[in-house]
Image: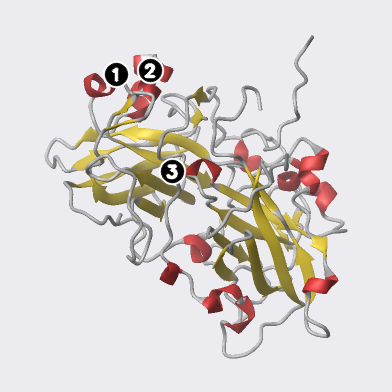
Amino acid sequence: MPKIREPDVHPPYLYPGYKSTILRAPKQPLVRVAPSPLDAVAPVFPKRFVKDAEADLTTWGKGAPLGEKMVLVGRVLDEDGKPVRGSLVELWQANASGRYAHPVDTHEAPLDPNFLGKGQVLTDDEGRYRFVTIKPGAYPWENHPFAWRPAHIHLSLFGNAYAQRLITQMFFPGDPLLPIDPIFNSVPDEAARLRMVADLALEHGVERIALGYRFDIVLRGPRATPMGV
Amino acid sequence: MAKQTPSQTVGPFFSRGLLWEDGGKVLFAGQGERITLAGRVLDGAGAPVADALLETWQADAAGKVPAAGDAARPHGYARVSTGADGGYAIETVMPGAYTDPDGDTYAPQLHVTLFARGLLKAVRTRVFLAGLDAIKDDPLARAVGNADRLKTLVAAPDSRDPTLYRWNVRLQGEGETVFIEF
């Protein structure tokens, strides 16, 4: 009986609709090797590496940043559904106008002196994390004519094993730019793509102040992945 | 079984979010032989990749998993971005060789993960800080097999400065670096 192959979770290296992949995608097949003892453990972040204030991106400046205030909550889990505890979650994003506080961002939208767009937390014993931020704006980019990135938040994760290291992007439900974004659509499987879209979760918001969104993140297991996955 | 969240590119705007002061200076609880790993990251046209995030993770000088500590950053781990010329540098100690429970011996090496605009998922590999003869029994060296390809993972000591190891990453094309999956 032919083996039923699960669709790929992750995007391919080469995805010509996203032009920057064309000269950067490796062409040789990846060499398969067993995870090393170092792949089975992760860098340990000292407690003092993360400060409580870094969970709230809206208190960085002297005043409040412009934009729609939001709370982002979620759990970091592994493929067995087990919580990933005490693990660093880093977040960075554009401001409400769709501009990054970054020297190479040339988008003609205003910087916000009260918003840097950077945060980090450690997950708790249930794998939970929580950020307070503002909803980032969409922004144009040079990939193709009239290209606009949908609003998104970048997230970087370590897991409890270096094999689990992941950088991803979180998108917003109902965004009309999602169907035309080559980065979002580089993920071949629709169900996997939709796992990058947060859920509106009003109950996690702050009444009359901030909208709530929930975004759970599932990392691979630390063991070798099955062939062909 | 929970289903994985897909990878997405780190994009070009990560530096304020992810870079650390002295992120290229690796901390350890103990001492060791100080070395520097430096080189450039190049694309399929041989052009510098000026916006890559390069991370290393390694054993300590005794070949042990880095111990937890209360330093400013995690032990054994470095994170830098490439510069305008695609260049990077990591200051660390020479990792020791180690043997896993299955009896496989790992030659002195750094685990490397590279993120960049245009990489929808990270490329991962291991760079050896020892010559071809000294790494031939390493599990990755055996898996690569082909000596020409394996050479892409060997950092060569500089002829004038033996503490400086040079290693370039070629993402694509002639001399393409070996990347791994596990």
| Label of residue B48 in the image | 3
Q: Which amino acid type is shown beneath numbered disc 1?
A: Lys
Where residue B36 sits in the image (x, y, percent)?
A: 24, 47
Q: Nearer the viewer, residue B75 or A60?
A: B75
A203 displayed left or right of A85: right
Q: Nearer the viewer, residue B37 or B6?
A: B6
Q: Are marks 3 and 2 in contact (CB under 8 Å)?
A: no
The answer for which chain carries disc 1 is B
Query: Which residue is pictured at 57% across the width and 74% down the height?
Result: A116
Crowding around mark 1 (Cα neighbors within 10 Å: few <14, some 14 to 19, many 20+) is some
Q: Earlier in the sequence, mark 1 or mark 3?
A: 3
Q: Nearer the viewer, residue A139 or B14?
A: B14
Assign a secondary structure to mark 1.
loop
B160 displayed left or right of A219: left
Label 3 and label 2: CA atoms lie apart by 30 Å
Q: Which residue is mark 1?
A: B136
